[in-house]
Structures are given as structure tokens and as C-alpha cells.
Image (cartoon, helix red, strand yellow):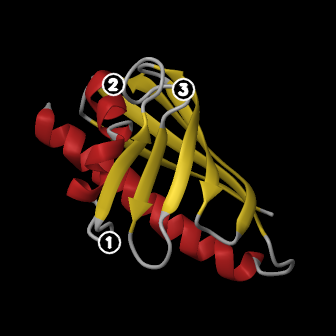
Amino acid sequence: MTEFTLTRTTPAPIEAVFDALTNHRGIASYVRLVRRSTLDREGTPPPNGIGAVRRIEALGPAIVEEIIDYQRPTRYAYKLVAGAPVRDHVGTVSLKEAGTGTEVSWHLRSTPKIPGLDWLLSPVLKRVIGELLNGAVDAAEGRA
């Protein structure tokens, strides 16, 4: 199993950061490697809340994830539905006010479908999550 947490602090307000992180249709606008990001199904509250299904197209098959927790502006979580050779893949993003800005922590837990490939999976996932986190924070800072 691969498990890690990436954390970043930004001067952007918590609401702007949360909205950038949960703008499922907008991921392609702030992550270079993502060609297209769409929302297959809206969630509750619409459009990005619990039950929303997002599709991220980059290299290889599309990554499909479902939002399983949504507590604006402090937390959201998702699980992988399709598109990667992993199981039990769950990401939880937590936000808290930090001085005049926001601290964001992205925790990921994932198990490769082929045992013993953690050494390969972990650095790839860290890079991908880092790109997503940095892109969303940069987008939030541009909006703030």
C-alpha cells in the first residue's frame, strides 16, 4: 500500500482554494498534463458535491473518480472508480485557515493491483498529486 500526505500553505482565502480544488471541470485549465477534465455526473450540492463523478484525461485511460465527502470549505474526499491499476484508492483533501491564508493537506492511500509495485506507484502518485495541488493553489491565488 502507498500512503502519503502533501501539504501546502497559500495566502489565498480558504473558500477560493476549496473552490479551485473542487472545480472538477476546470482541472485541465491548471494542470499541464491533463488534456481534458469533465463532470460525468453532478453531486450534492450541485455540481461538485457528494456523488459527483469526475473524468480526467491525460496519458493512458481516463481516470474516473467519485466524490465521497464534501464539506465546504474544509474537506472533500474521493475514491477511484476506474482508469488506474490500483484498488482502495482514496484521496482526502483537508483545508484550514492559517494566519491570513490557507493550509491544504492532500492525503492519499492506494494499493497497486499487482503486489510489490509500491516502489513504482508511490513516486508517480506523489508527482501527480503534487501537480494537482500546486495547480489548484495557483488557480486560487490568481482568483483571490
Q: Position of residue 73 (x, y in %)?
A: 41, 20
Label 3 Cα crowd, 10 Å radius (few <14 / some 14-19 / many 20+): many
**Type of amino acid at the residue the image marks with label 2:** Ile
Which label belongs to residue 50? 3
Please give left or right for residue 115 compared with residue 67 in the image: right
Q: Are marks 3 and 1 in contact (CB under 8 Å)?
A: no
Q: Position of residue 47 (x, y in %)?
A: 36, 27
Distance from the alpha carbon under mark 3 to that under mark 1: 26 Å
Please give left or right for residue 39 compared with residue 81 in the image: left
Distance from the alpha carbon under mark 1 to that under mark 2: 26 Å
| Mark sitting earlier along the chain (3/2) | 2
The residue at which mark 1 appears reads as 33
Dot 1: what SS?
Answer: loop
Residue at the far front in the pictured view: 40
Label 2 Cα crowd, 10 Å radius (few <14 / some 14-19 / many 20+): many
Which label belongs to residue 14? 2
Quadrant for the C terminus in the image: top left
Residue 117 figure quarter: bottom right
Which residue is at a point 43% across and 19% down the rendered structure image? 72
